[in-house]
Structures are given as C-alpha cells and as structure tokens.
Amino acid sequence: MVSVIADKINNFLTSASWIRKMFEEGDRLRKIHGADNVYDFTLGNPVNEPPKAFHQKLKQLADNPIPGMHRYMSNAGYPETRQAVAEVLSENSDVNIRPNHIVMTVGAGGGLNVILKAILNPGDEVIVLAPYFVEYRFYVDNHNGVLKEVSTDEHFLPDLNTIAAAMTEKTRAVIINSPNNPTGVVYPPEVLVKLEKLVAEKSKEYGRPIYVISDEPYSKIAYDVEVPSVFKYITNSIMVTSHSKDLALPGERIGYAAVSPNIENVELLLEAMVFCNRTLGYVNAPALMQRLVVDLQRESVDIEEYREKRDLLYNSLINLGFKMVKPEGAFYLFPKSPVPDDVQFAQLALKHNILVVPGAGFGKPGYFRLAYCIDKQVIENSLPAWKALAKELNL
C-alpha cells in the first residue's frame, strides 16, 4: 500500500493518545447504554462555565466594539494585555516582570512550541518528568529535539539525582508542570531551590544555558497550598500557561509565555520567541480573547467546586481500597493500578462503563488517570460501578 502520510506521523498515530482512544470508546458506550450510564473520566475538558466577569466583559465589547479590534497587532500581543499579565506575575514573584517579557500565545500548547522552536538546535535534549503530559513528546519532536524521560520519586516529586544523571552537553531544557497533570502534585519551593542549583551548575559546566520551562495552566487551581512562582526561585526560567483551566476557556486558545528578566540576553530570547510566534503560523494570540482577559487576570473559576469533587472521588476510592497520592492541585487523580498492567485495568473498568486513561499514556505504567472536572452527578452516579469493580478485584 502506498503511504499517503509521513512514516513518522503514521508511527505517532498508532501510539499517540490514550486519552483520545478512551474518549472515543466512551462515545461508543454512550450509544449503547445511554449517557447517564457511562462514567467518563478521560478528558480534562472542564464543565465549569467561565466566571461572570468574563461574560460581562464579552457583552461590553459586543455592545461597544473598539474600532480596529479585530485587526493584526504586534506578534507579541496587545501592550495592555501584556501589562496586565506582567503586573500579576510581578506581584506573585517579587520579580520585576515587564510587559516586554510577555508573549501572548495560542494557548499553552502554542506557547510551548514557540519556546522550543526558539531554543532548540537539532538533537538538543529536553528532560521531562514522568508522569507527564503526553503532548510534550510531540512538541519536542516538532522542533527536532530529543525527549528524555526521567522518573519522579514515590510522591511524584522531581528526583534531583535522577535529573542530574540524565543531563548531558546536549541538554537544553527541563520541563516542569506544577500543579501536575496527571498527578495533581504541587512542587514546593525547596524543590525549585534545588533545581535552580542543579541547572546553574550544569549550565556553567556545559557553557550554555539550560532553561527550566514551567508549564502552569493549573496554577490557580490549588487546594490548601500555594503554588510557588518559578521566577522567584529559578534564574533561567520561562513560564507558559493558558486560561483554559483557570477561566474555563479551553476552546478559546488564549495563553501566554513569560520570560524571567534575569536570563542573560533575555531580549534576544524574546525576539526569537516573537519571531517564532509568527513563523510557526500562529501569528498572534486571538485578538478578542486578548482584550477580554485584560481585566480577568485575578479571576478564576470556583476552586471550591473542584475541591468538593476531588474529596468525593478521592475519599470514595480510598475507602474502596485504591491507593494514590492525594492531589494538591489541578483536577486529576492518579491512582495505582490494582493489577500490574494498567491497560488491562482500563479494560476491566470498561466492563463497568468506567472510562480511565492508563498511566502508560503519561510515561508511567502501573497507574491510571481520572479527570474529575466533570459534573459532580456523574461522579456520584459512578460510585456503585466503582464499588462493583473493587469487589471484582478483591480490594
């Protein structure tokens, strides 16, 4: 058969996303059993509506359009939007972040691609901490980089010795994600302090900067802990985020990348990122969304709703005999699979109309991920199915 697509992409398609595979399986089950009888925990697609302030601002702009509001702007974004972002980042970090340190992007995914395009030479290595968001692999490959997986410790926190052992003269960046997808773990300040020391030492040893790229779309969704600012602790840090989760706007694809002013030759790095924002085809972040989020930088969805769902699902599963680290942020649980093969466990769960994502899809076999950003009623309705599954597994 003649191949109509690239061999590499064909290989990626066969191994790509367990999340999408299980979501599609859910569609099949819903057609058979009805939506109320299928318990889908696969996709991090929040059911929460955006804050009231978002709708008010949207109506205000619709009723009073600004002349030229849909035209091109600087590839880095509107000055007033970048100013609003910089002010909040400065407050949270005690670092003087200015508007020119901000590049508005097409979501966090667009931001990560812009950053990686700007810093990677072919063959450069990017370290990721397993478990990790699977798209990192494809983003790094997009720019001819090499992904290196490094395991976290038993609490899913970075293991600095393991990271150090993985570093070589080709290491260009370490991607961290806190609060983490899929574990919900928040990296405390002492971990960032140790990471800064390691990165500084290795940058000096290899004669070029190693960047810490902090992927933070869940930074406002945290329970009982404060998410520390990477700028406060790490010199060569670049933060990327989106308003997909904190404002419940995943389909609007609005985010930004922010660069520490303490990076050497920071102006050249920013110039490269703005250039890549354009030449990767994003051109600029969506104009309407940029205008909307100017006044929403201190807004967020109701975090207490997520806490309720977390506690309901976590406590119910723990009582049934499942084992997991209690998440401090984001909206995921990452329990240990009761059987060694997490893919096999996902298939067993399907028998009870429960859809989960195997840990193998996040570089961490032996676990599974649950997204609890769904209706609370779905979680409540699923509990008898979880009980039946636990009984089948003799938990």
Image (cartoon, rainbow, N blue to C red):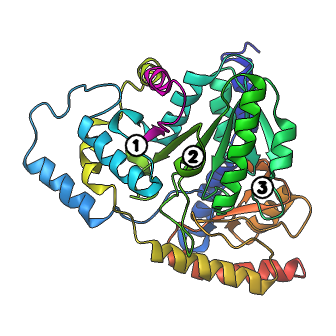
Q: Quadrant of residue 168?
A: top right
Q: CA distance from mark 3 to mark 2?
A: 20 Å
Residue 215 image label? 2
Write down the quadrant of residue 383 in the picture: bottom right
Q: Secondary structure at mark 1?
A: loop
Residue 249 seen in render: no
Q: In the image shown, does 395 or 99 lie closer to the viewer? A: 99
Pointer 1 residue: 97
For marks 3 and 1, the one nearer the N-term is 1
Q: Amino acid at mark 3?
A: Gly
Q: Amino acid at mark 1?
A: Ile
Q: Are marks 3 and 2 in contact (CB under 8 Å)?
A: no
Give the labeled residue for mark 3.
359
User: Looking at the picture, does residue 266 appear above or below residue 214?
Assistant: above
Give the amino acid type for the residue marked by disc 2 in the picture: Asp
Closest to the observer, 205 or 99: 205
N-terminal of the pair, mark 1 or mark 2, is 1
Residue 228 image offset from top left, x and y in percent: 55, 59
Instruction: Locate the N terminus by quadrant.
Output: top right
Q: Find residue 340 and name its label.
A: none
Q: Is residue 329 left or right of residue 124?
A: left
* Alpha-carbon span between mark 3 and mark 1: 37 Å
Residue 222 location, x and y as percent? 54, 68
